[in-house]
Image (cartoon, rainbow, N blue to C red):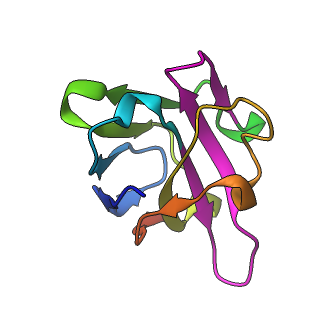
Amino acid sequence: QVQLVESGGGLVQAGGSLRLSCAASGRTFSNYAMAWFRQAPGQEREFVAANNWYAGGTYYADSVKGRFTISRDNAKNTVFLQMNSLKPEETAVYYCAARGPSNSNYGDWRTYKDWGQGTQVTVSS
């Protein structure tokens, strides 16, 4: 099991940027596939981006391609989500998640074992 703690959320105007961070515990961080999901009130949890350093692979939801970038620093057990050109409809709680190094079903939140507490991102119009 890995413990995850997100930070970096906040209020930003439309078109602005935010960088989320997710710090993980554990000594085998590089073996984990890491992902970001988001959930707006009354909506289902939505895949945003995933990175599988061990098996290779970086994936994005179509809605964020070209604007969001997922990256990780294995030496610091941290994964990041750089979000640019944010839109009001992207207001949500953003969650960091971890699972084993498989590239299958990377967008299915039910396949992730460990979750952070979430960080609120609010994009004003």
Q: Indicate yes or no whether the magenta region holds residue 55.
A: yes
Q: Is residue 87 above or below residue 11?
A: above
On the image, the x and y values in percent for residue 24 come to: 30, 49
Residue 26 visible in the snapshot? yes
In magenta, the rendered stretch is 35-60
On the image, the x and y values in percent for residue 115 come to: 48, 63
Residue 124 visible in the snapshot? no
Q: Splitting the image into 4 quarters, where does residue 49 fall?
A: top right
Q: Is residue 57 above or below residue 23?
A: above
- Residue at 70% from the left image edge and 66% from the top image edge: 45
List the single residue furthest toward the bottom. Answer: 42
List the single residue furthest toward the left. Answer: 76
- Residue at 40% from the left image edge and 72% from the top image edge: 117
On the image, the x and y values in percent for residue 113 come to: 58, 59
111 displayed left or right of 32:
right
User: Residue 122 or 15: which is nearer the viewer?
Assistant: 122
Q: Quadrant of the N terminus?
A: bottom left
Q: Splitting the image into 4 quarters, where does residue 89 fall?
A: bottom right
Q: Is residue 76 above or below residue 124?
A: above
Q: How many marks?
A: 0
Q: Is residue 98 above or below residue 82?
A: below
User: Residue 69 or 76: which is nearer the viewer?
Assistant: 76
Q: Splitting the image into 4 quarters, where does residue 11 fall?
A: bottom left
List the single residue furthest toward the top. Answer: 56
- Residue at 51% from the left image edge and 20% from the top image edge: 54
77 displayed left or right of 17:
left
- Residue at 59% from the left image edge and 32% from the top image edge: 101
